[in-house]
Image: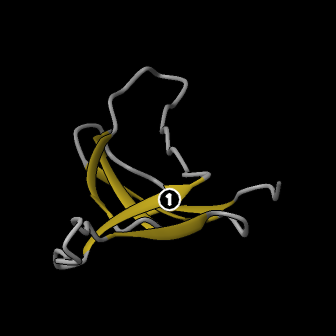
Amino acid sequence: MATPTVIARLSAAVFAPGEQMLLTVTYSDADTKPLTVTIVVTDAQGNSSAPVRANVVIDPLTLVVTDDSGRTWARVSDTGSVAVYRAVA
């Protein structure tokens, strides 16, 4: 199993109390694998359904953001490789 990688950056280096902080996290894992399962149902007469696809991810990543002040970081967006979180200074 590969070790996940992560890079994080804040929108500024210094914040005034009450100011919005944005944290951008870029993350990946070399062995996370998307998988598509295709299902077709066929009856005894040879009639088949249209294919149905289900998408899954093997070895998914979970992102958790905390800081030592106990503030809440709210997820703004997450593409599966780049996530943005917001908190108040």
Image coordinates for residue 7, horizontal then vertical, percent:
63, 64
Which residue occupies the extreme front position in the image?
45
Seen from the viewer's position, the closer of residues 15 and 30 is 30
> Would residue 65 be found to the left or right of residue 17 on screen?
right
| Residue 69 x, y percent position in the rendering | 47, 22
The location of residue 18, given as percent across then percent down, is 22, 39
> As drawn, which residue projects farthest toward the top?
70
55 displayed left or right of 27: left
Q: Is residue 57 above or below residue 62?
A: below
6 or 30, which is in the foreground? Answer: 30
- The mark total stands at 1
User: Mark 1: which amino acid?
Assistant: Val
Q: Position of residue 84 (x, y in %)?
A: 35, 60
Q: Residue at x 37, y 65 (%)?
A: 55
User: Is any atom of residue 26 visible in this view?
Assistant: yes
Q: Quadrant of residue 74?
A: top left
Q: Which residue: 83% across, 54% down?
A: 1
Colouring chosen for the image of the structure: secondary structure
- Of residues 23 and 64, the one drawn nearer to the viewer in this rendering: 64
Q: Is residue 38 left or right of residue 40?
A: right
Judge left or right: residue 21 versus residue 56.
left
Which of the 4 image quarters holds residue 88?
top left
Q: Which residue is mark 1?
A: 57
Question: Callout 1: helix, strand or loop?
Answer: strand
Q: Is residue 11 visible?
A: no
Q: Which quadrant would the C terminus be assigned to in this image?
A: top left
Residue at 43%, 65% (x, y): give it: 80
**Which residue does the image show at 55% across and 50% down from the upper left?**
61
